Image: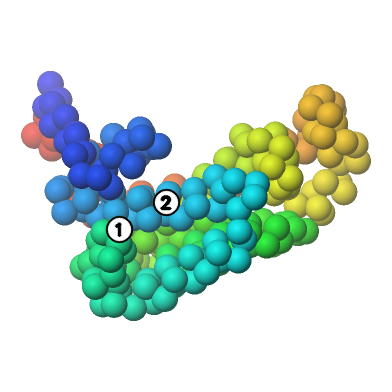
Amino acid sequence: MMARRPWPVRTATPFGEIMRKHARTFTFAAGFLDRERRHATEVLYAFFRTLDDLVDERPQDADIDQLRAELHRWDALVADPERALGAPSPLARALGATMLRYEIPPAYPQALLRGLEDDLDGRPIATVHDLERYAFRVAGAVGLAMCHVLGATTPTALAAASAVGIAMQLTNIVRDVENDLRRGRVYLPSDDLAQFPGALEALCVRRMSPPLRDLMRHQIGRARRYYLAGATGVAELPPRVRFLPDPGGD
């Protein structure tokens, strides 16, 4: 008979509450980590979520230059985690401590900030390369940061984590395509839209059509390929951060 695994620990920190509010599955998974790694996960999630919401949830009359200046302030902090330790923001201090503790390269949080600037500027997604670069910045970089927290920093692990992050962002784009369009943003590459004439027109009028269905299947296929690439990283995770059956169980 398989031994019972301990039920995951419920988060109680302010950063944990942010994760609980927005990411129930992620919260559940983080509950199986030891206290230190769980706290680091909560801090990283709070940073990525807070900055993402700053841009994505901005009001229509938001001052874009002011938002860009805020992103630049964060860029300066993550570039120098020691400096972040003395920042007035509790999140900045916690992030700086987490980056130093787990040796997270500044390039990872900075990648998110580049992606958010792309959103602020309304940079078009013209090619698949543009799409993959954007997905890496806003999601793949999260996976790379988590690799350091989990202790899986081999080249294979990093590549797999990046692939999973990109896959998840591609999934979000398919799921949120209508909401993004309502906000005047299209994350589907122009090159892909050109391959399926009539798909964009059908999307704009919220009417399913064969070209739109084929376009969505094309996007889903790309995401699946990234998920498959990311699956190779599971074996790279140290046993202490994996959810495994008790070796003494039957």
Instruction: Give percent across and percent down for residue 81.
Output: 30, 74
Instruction: Examine the rendering and report whether any part of residue 214 can be seen.
Output: yes
Q: Residue furthest top?
A: 1
Instruction: Point out the tag, 1 or 2, that comes first from the N-terminus.
Output: 2
Instruction: Give percent across and percent down for residue 212.
Output: 81, 33
240 lies above or below 151: above
Circles 1 and 2, Cβ within 8 Å, touching? The answer is yes
The kind of residue on which mark 2 rests is Thr
In the foreground, 152 or 84: 84
Q: In the figure, residue 217 lies in which quadrant?
A: top right
Residue at the spot 80% in from the left edge and 49% down from the top edge: 192
Residue at the spot 28% in from the left edge and 66% down from the top edge: 88
Instruction: Examine the rendering and report whether any part of residue 219 can be seen.
Output: no
In the foreground, 45 or 87: 87
Residue at the spot 37% in from the left edge and 55% down from the top edge: 47
SS of the residue under disc 1: helix
Which residue in the structure is indicated by mark 1? 91
Q: Is residue 140 left or right of residue 245?
A: right
The kind of residue on which mark 1 rests is Leu
Give the Cα distance between marks 1 and 2.
9 Å
Q: In the figure, residue 114 lies in which quadrant?
A: bottom right
117 lies above or below 3: below
- How packed is label 2: few (under 14 Cα within 10 Å), some, or many (20 or more)? some
156 lies above or below 81: above
